[in-house]
Amino acid sequence: MLRNQIITTDDLYEFKLQLFEELKKLLNKSSHIPNQQYLKSAEVMKLLKVSPGTLQNLRINGTIPYTKIGGIILYDYQEITRVLRENQYNNK
């Protein structure tokens, strides 16, 4: 049995706030965008979903630029996204 209910503007406003909060939570959970500019190898492997050997090959053949300081290899996040955009294919 259905009853008629009156929905007020306050009810709609409250619903909107709850919806935005849920969306924020979902975006924060699914966001893979790092907060820092430079990433370590483990972070890049996770981001690109590649193995250590594949990442090494990408470095060796010059696909992904990197910086080596001591024994630490760092990757510029903006450069990685640029490489991804430049190598994007659109099959129609």
Image: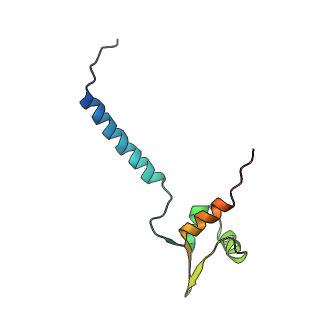
Instruction: Tell me what residue is drawn at x 44 percent, y 65 percent.
Output: 35
Which quadrant does the C terminus fall into? top right
* Residue 39 x/y as whole percent: 52, 71
Looking at the image, the residue that sits furthest to the top is 1
* Residue 74 x/y as whole percent: 55, 77
Side of 36 where 85 appears, left or right? right
Quarter of the image for residue 60 reads bottom right
> Relative to 13, does residue 51 appear above or below in the rendering?
below
Looking at the image, the residue that sits furthest to the bottom is 70
* Residue 12 x/y as whole percent: 30, 31
* Closer-to-camera residue (77/70): 77
Circle count: 0
Quarter of the image for residue 20 reads top left
> Relative to 6, does residue 18 appear above or below in the rendering?
below
Quarter of the image for residue 72 reads bottom right
Looking at the image, the residue that sits furthest to the right is 92
* Residue 66 x/y as whole percent: 60, 77
* Closer-to-camera residue (82/34): 82
Side of 57 where 79 appears, left or right? left
How is this picture coloured? rainbow
Instruction: Tell me what residue is drawn at x 42 percent, y 53 percent.
Output: 28
Instruction: Tell me what residue is drawn at x 25 percent, y 25 percent.
Output: 8
> Relative to 20, does residue 72 appear above or below in the rendering?
below
Which quadrant does the N terminus fall into? top left
